[in-house]
Amino acid sequence: MNVLTDNFAAFRDGFLKTVELTALSTLLALVLGILIAAFRVSPVPALRVFGTVWVTLLRNTPLVLLFLIVTLGLPALGLKGWDSFWLAVMALGCYTSAFICEAVRSGINTVSVGQAEAARSIGMTFSQTLGHIVLPQAARTAIPPVGSLIIALTKNSAIASGFDVMELGALQKELNADAGYNILVIFLWIAICYLIITLTLSGLFRLLENRMAVAR
Amino acid sequence: MSEVSVTKDAAPVAGDLVALTGVNKHFGALHVLQDIDLTIARGEVVVVIGPSGSGKSTLCRAINRLETIDSGTITIDGKPLPQEGKELARLRSDVGMVFQSFNLFAHKTVLENVTLGQTKVRKIERKAAETKARALLDRVGVGTQADKYPAQLSGGQQQRVAIARALAMDPKVMLFDEPTSALDPEMINEVLEVMQQLALEGMTMIVVTHEMGFARSAANRVVFMADGRIVEQATPDQFFSNPRSDRAKDFLSKILHH
Ligand SMILES: Nc1ncnc2c1ncn2[C@@H]1O[C@H](COP(=O)(O)OP(=O)(O)OP(=O)(O)O)[C@@H](O)[C@H]1O
Ligand SMILES: [Mg+2]
């Protein structure tokens, strides 16, 4: 009768898979996003060009297409042996990194140039200036939009269900196959699972924001 | 009166700490620095003065390469300024810079502002860096503010912290770009006093300022700039009482009657 209790193990596995997929993709997106943002403000023209191309390509490509490119394109290029989960992490992480990069970069733009000049004038290198002076101050403005991007990533991760990753979104196909359940109830439970993740994320980012506001 | 060269110096001499030769710089069509030749000897205090837009800030910023130049050479202690990179960072750490707008690291405490360069650039141990920072903060009279954030300090206090931050790197030369222009009148003197003391202790200083009291009492030489050129160089006494160029006469009449 009850979809959730009857299929608790499947829900739990799907939930955990979505959490895992979101967490790893977020990690990749943050690392890449900050790195590419650093590229985009670096004094090296080649890096700036690379950063611009990265953002332009990834931000303007539909995510589904990116999944297709990664899952079909990489094996075609000889990169075999990656399972669908890691390919999904790559697609989601790279896609979101372009948006994170822009959020970080707009944060960087709110820090007055005098801060970086003062850092350079005491002999700090580009990476020290960025790491110790500019990024920590950029974080205050970048954190709220980054929070929204990670919530969007969580929801985007459902696309992975179309590419053989058994996460929450895939549950619906599986359960629908066993007839007898009300499809709306299935969707409701899946939605609640997503809400648990996204509301937790919202809370975490709210906390982080408050923390940054206190430390001036 | 100390001897001061008022003619254009030729190639850098061994005793010169900062030497600019044939320096040119454009901002688009604007020729901000035109054939600048300037040498500053070790221990010398040079005040740069001139109308707004004459290129004083650009000159200062070019000396630690916050601004690149189009042609000419700039050497610090005999070494030409390198290209952007580690080498330049090292050289910059020997050139202290004090900005009009203080530019203290807003997310760091006063103490951290003064230790950061020591620990990250000089790789000095944190304990030793803090001891030195506290001594410097005492010296500029803001020792009791060490644990505050810059925004909690007055402008005069912030600027003195900025001087301490630069001094913490043991610079060979200090550049000051209008260090008192952003300050309320009652705070100007506390900053000038610190600078005066520094000059007395033998620090090599290049100071862009319109504070004539400071120029008269602390400077060995006044450099007058207009339209991107060095128009006149003289001792402060000579310059203020008997300027030779019309540009300088005109400029002085404006600021003196102000
Ligand atoms: N980054 C820049 N891009 C374009 N033009 C600039 C830039 N920086 C300065 N300038 C121009 O170069 C000229 C010289 O500027 P600079 O700041 O060196 O003058 P200054 O003598 O310091 O003037 P002030 O007394 O107003 O500080 C000015 O006309 C200024 O508008
Ligand atoms: Mg200026």
Image (cartoon, rainbow, N blue to C red):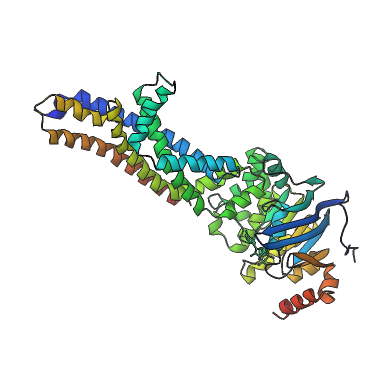
Report if residue B62 is visible in the image: yes
Report if residue B104 is visible in the image: no
Image quadrant of ligand 2? bottom right
Residue B214 locus on image (x, y percent): 75, 67
Residue A131 locus on image (x, y percent): 55, 42
Residue B107's place in the image compared with B213, above or below, is above
Q: Residue at x 31, y 30 (%)?
A: A160
Give whichever of B155, A176 is nearer the camera. A176
Q: For the view shown, which residue lies furthest in the front direction? A: A76
Give whichever of B24, A115 is nearer the camera. B24
Position of the N terminus of chain B, as image quadrant, is bottom right
Residue B128's place in the image compared with B97, above or below, is above
Q: Residue at x 66, y 67 (%)?
A: B188
Residue A62 locus on image (x, y percent): 35, 39
Q: Residue at x 40, y 30 (%)?
A: A90
- Quarter of image, res B140: bottom right
Q: Residue at x 18, y 35 (%)?
A: A187
